Image (spheres, rainbow, N blue to C red):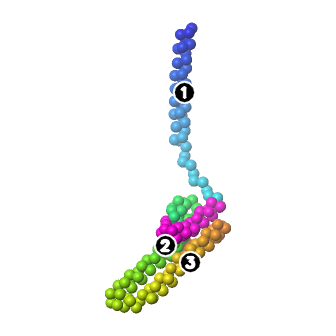
């Protein structure tokens, strides 16, 4: 009898291990048959927060000079299929930042390059005061855009459909054609 008990226990252990293997295989088969999870709809407060963050990304330009539009564009890429509101606000913020920061920076650089080239002919020496004044005037644009971007973020945090002047209509037109 003692021999029978010893033989029964290993047989039972073998059976349970086979049952575990079958159970594990069934679980794996069930997981493979499940459809991929559907993307959850965003709540209005989440939409407002992401739109606000895309507008506040303009503050990154103070420290880096160029990362603001990159962050806003990444938000656009992540949420363009999930929320038209976030997609529109972030794309609008991207274009606005590119125009006001990168565009103005290129314009200032071109102005100084032209002045440098004109100094070869001695005319540029007389243009330096105008170039300095032009630079000061053009530096006001990115600073004003900071205020405008913060205002846009506040409007989006309240759930309003904010639209930048000139840029908003252009972005809406291109976004609706996509």
The total of numbered circles placed on residues is 3
Q: Decide which of 33, 27 is in the foreground and name it.
A: 27
What residue sits right under mark 1 in the picture? 19
Q: Is residue 9 magenta?
A: no
Q: Residue 36 in the image: x percent, y percent?
A: 54, 48
Q: SS class of the residue under badge 2? A: helix
Please state if 85 lies on the left or on the right of 95 as rendered: right
Q: Is there a contact, CB below 8 Å, between mark 1 and mark 3?
A: no
Residue sitting at x 53%, y 67%: 60
What residue sits right under mark 2 in the picture? 98
Q: Is there a contact, CB below 8 Å, between mark 2 and mark 1?
A: no
Task: Let me know if residue 169 appears in the view.
Answer: no
Q: CA distance from mark 2 to mark 1?
A: 62 Å
Depth-wise, is mark 1 or mark 3 nearer the camera? 3
Other-residue count near label 3 (Cα within 10 Å), few / some / many at <14 / 14–19 / ≥20:
few
Depth-wise, is mark 2 or mark 1 nearer the camera? 2
Q: Is residue 56 magenta?
A: yes
Is 32 drawn above or below residue 75 in the view shown? above
Residue sitting at x 63%, y 68%: 156
Residue sitting at x 53%, y 10%: 3
Considering only order in the chain, which callout, 2 or 3, is on the residue closer to the N terminus? 2
Q: Residue 106: name its quadrant.
A: bottom left
Task: Let me know if residue 52 appears in the view.
Answer: yes
Q: Residue 52 in the image: x percent, y percent?
A: 60, 66
Span colored in magenta: 44-70
Considering only order in the chain, which callout, 3 or 1, is on the residue closer to the N terminus? 1
Q: SS class of the residue under badge 3? A: helix
What residue sits right under mark 3 in the picture? 144
Q: Residue 54 in the image: x percent, y percent?
A: 56, 66
Q: Residue 151: name its quadrant.
A: bottom right
């Amino acid at each position: 009898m003692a021999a029978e008990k010893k033989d029964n226990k290993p047989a039972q252990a073998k059976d349970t291990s086979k049952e575990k293997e079958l159970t594990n295989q069934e679980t794996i088969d069930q997981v493979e048959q499940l459809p991929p999870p559907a993307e959850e709809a965003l709540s209005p407060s989440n939409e407002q927060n992401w739109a606000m963050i895309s507008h506040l990304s303009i503050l990154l330009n103070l420290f880096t000079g160029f990362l603001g539009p990159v962050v806003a564009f990444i938000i656009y890429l992540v949420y363009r299929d999930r929320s038209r509101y976030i997609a529109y606000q972030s794309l609008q913020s991207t274009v606005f930042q590119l125009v006001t920061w990168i565009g103005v920076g290129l314009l200032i650089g071109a102005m100084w390059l032209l002045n440098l080239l004109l100094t070869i002919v001695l005319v540029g020496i007389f243009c330096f005061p105008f170039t300095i004044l032009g630079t000061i005037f053009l530096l006001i644009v990115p600073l004003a855009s900071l205020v405008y971007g913060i205002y846009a973020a506040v409007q989006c945090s309240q759930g309003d459909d904010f639209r930048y002047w000139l840029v908003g209509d252009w972005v809406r037109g291109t976004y609706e054609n996509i």
